[in-house]
Image (cartoon, grey):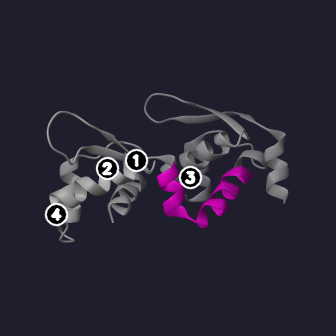
Amino acid sequence: FTLQVLYESFLDSGRTYISGETILSAESNEGLTLSLISESLEILEHQGYIEQLKHLGPGPYHARIQTYGVSTMLGNDESALLQKVGFCLTNDGMTDCAEIAAATGVVFPLVDHAIKCLEGQGLVKAVRAMGGVTFVHYVNPMLRRALSQ
């Protein structure tokens, strides 16, 4: 349930950290205790799903979902997302993340996630500017071939 809370926050506001109090209030409605929530966050971070901003004092700490966590939450739907974004890049020549989001009807954070995944595969290169603006400045010809299969 903890990963679900962070994923929903990601869909609303991207990769910004959410406060421990927000996580706590969302999960206490489910009857989860403070120690169980802190333990869940620790385990999720250890497994690479999330990142926490730790400080002195007890948790839960500010946290955000990582790329691996988003991929896990998307499951089988991730390949369709990558394909949809890939076609915008190769067929339509779109390079702006916001433009792709508007054209596809996919929320901006998911389009940015898809671009990150394609970057990880070496199929695109992107620049992320202040304010969350993402531009793809290079599309590897292998992306077109990968999409045709």
Q: Is residue 141 left or right of residue 40?
A: right
**How far across and how far down the image is residue 40, in percent?**
30, 57
Image marks 4 and 2: residues in contact by CB distance under 8 Å: no
- Give how far apart the Cα atoms at labels 4 and 1 are: 20 Å
Q: Earlier in the sequence, mark 4 or mark 1?
A: 4
Query: Of circles 3 and 1, which is in front?
Result: 1
Label 1: which residue?
46
Residue at 67% across / 45% down in the picture? 118
Numbered disc 3: secondary structure: helix
Image marks 1 and 2: residues in contact by CB distance under 8 Å: yes
* Front residue of this view, candidates 104 and 147: 147
- Give how far apart the Cα atoms at labels 3 and 1 are: 35 Å
- Give how far apart the Cα atoms at labels 1 and 2 are: 6 Å
Label 3: which residue?
102
Type of amino acid under label 3 = Ala
Numbered disc 4: secondary structure: loop
Type of amino acid under label 1 = His
Query: Of circles 4 and 1, which is in front?
Result: 1
Query: Of circles 2 and 3, which is in front?
Result: 2
Label 4: which residue?
33
Label 2: few (<14), some (14–19) or many (≥20) C-alpha neighbours in 10 Å: some
Q: Quadrant of residue 25?
A: bottom left
Label 2: which residue?
42
